[in-house]
Image (tube, rainbow, N blue to C red):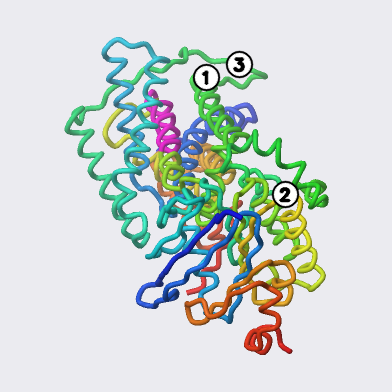
Amino acid sequence: MALPLAFTWTEFAQQVTSGLAAGSIYASLALALVLIYQTTNVVNFAQGEMATFTTYVAWTMMHHGLSYWPAFALTLLIAFGGGVTVERVLIRPVEHRPEIVIVILTIGLFIAINGLVGWIFGPEVKAFDSPFPNTSIVVGGVSTSVQDIGTFGVCLGTVVVLWLFFRLTTLGLAMRAVAFNPDASRLMGVRVGWMLALGWGFAAVLGAIAGMMAAPTVFLDPDMMLVILIYAFAAAVLGGIDSPVGAVVGGLLIGVVLNVLGAYVNFVGQELRLPTALAVLLLVLVIRPSGLFGRVVVRRV
Amino acid sequence: MTTLLELSEVEARYGPIKALHGVSLTVADGEIVALLGANGAGKTTTLRAVSGTVRHTGEIAFEGKQIARGKPDAVARAGIAHVPEGRGLFTQLSVWENLRMGAYVRGERRTLRAEAPRVFKYFPWLERRRDQQAGTLSGGEQQMLALARALVGRPRLLMLDEPSLGLAPTVVQEIFRIVTELNEEDGLTVLVVEQNANVALDAAARAYVLEVGRVAIEGRSAELRRHEGVRKSYLGY
């Protein structure tokens, strides 16, 4: 077992900053889950695997000589198209069925993509390039890797762009309206089905970003997003599964808490991070099921 | 006057239960028409058949063309605004965002620029409270916002489902005053469903009375006021 470090504030700040970087990845994936939950009313269990697949797509392009950022941009486009296609082809036919049907479908999709990735790309672990130099910046004694800063910047930058899109554009407003009241949206002339598909497209883009930002550190393998998806679940539930702000705050909190606990609490260590995340998930569900930012929904049955 | 909306022998059902047994009616361009009747007579279903929120058989023609069946978004884009039972506001969105959604049907930005000032003329308080969350408005204010949102899209036909429901008499009068004014000044065509027959007949030129999914009585409002059955059953004198 790793010995806990002696406590210093600089060391603590260092743990927090690297926790924020990991947390921004969880936040992206958690936001993807929330986007789909808000429109389709289910948790998309395949979100992590969709991200894994797109990360492999990025790897393939780079493997064939494309440089990082063009491959990154192309991957986002492909992810968007893939997300839209999944909604149109797989989810749409069961749209009006009970939610459990859709949940089972996403679990099936999870298994299918996982198998497909192993079959196409092989089970062995691959290295994935990072676009950021392997150096550190020291500010006030706290050393932060450029990799962490870059990851945080890309993930949070995407979140901000998405937020502006939902606030300022007509399409973004229509997508929010559909999430709140699909029937009323139809009466306003909104093509609700396409808004749902767009939601899946954006969720897939967020997932792809999370995958590509995580891959340089966790390495590329068919199960790479499994644990990250569970952290993202914990983040989404902690923030409130229907709250985009909650997902982002929840993701950052989970990242920081896991990192700090891992470094300072004797029995947590690296190995027990996952059970700790599950404990957070369980605790939130028991104490405050609506999460930090969620709405309490009372269903009359 | 040219016919804007024409229903002939329209039937509609909810699962096994038939709600409309062949409703035929017309609304002319520039007219206010009231749809009266008891609870469950099929008034709401008639509006829903037009807006496509319930499937129908029979013919519904709007501006001479058959209306898209079961496609509310297409009907809205054709120029029919339906303010449904319960108003259908986006309660978590702001007043202004609700109005933006009303303009969506014709292309949000351009429409809003042109139409918002016109709508604010009728509802000046909306402009002052544009950032308020719609769900926090009072019932009467919500009804007016729903009306304003429909008007921002400059519909060819406005369908109102029981705008008076649960509102104070002064608020009801205010709403009907605005609808009448819009009709007189802008030539807005309105099909309004009402339980409150008195106020509806004041505003409407003509009315249809539905009974168990069929048109039982129709005529000019003044005639219906003198009709004994209408007086006893719906006007209360």
Q: Amino acid at mark 3?
A: Val
- Judging from the image, mark 2 belongs to the subunit labelled B
Up the image or down, B170 lies above or below A260; here it is below
**Residue A211 in the image, given as x and y percentages of width and height:** 39, 30
Q: Is residue A71 magenta?
A: no
The overriding secondary structure of the stretch rendered in magenta is helix
Q: Are marks 3 and 1 on the same chain?
A: yes
Q: Which mark is residue A98?
A: none
Q: Which residue is mark 2?
A: B186
> Who's the residue at 44% across and 66% down the image?
B8
Asked if residue A214 is positioned above or below residue A73 in the image, the reply reads: below
Q: Which labelled disc corresponds to residue A145?
A: 1
Give residue A172's quadrant in the image. top right
- Which residue has dot 3 on it? A138
Q: Nearer the viewer, residue B229 or B42?
A: B229
Q: Position of residue A180 (x, y in %)?
A: 55, 53
Left or right of residue A45: residue A300: right
Span shown in magenta = A201-216
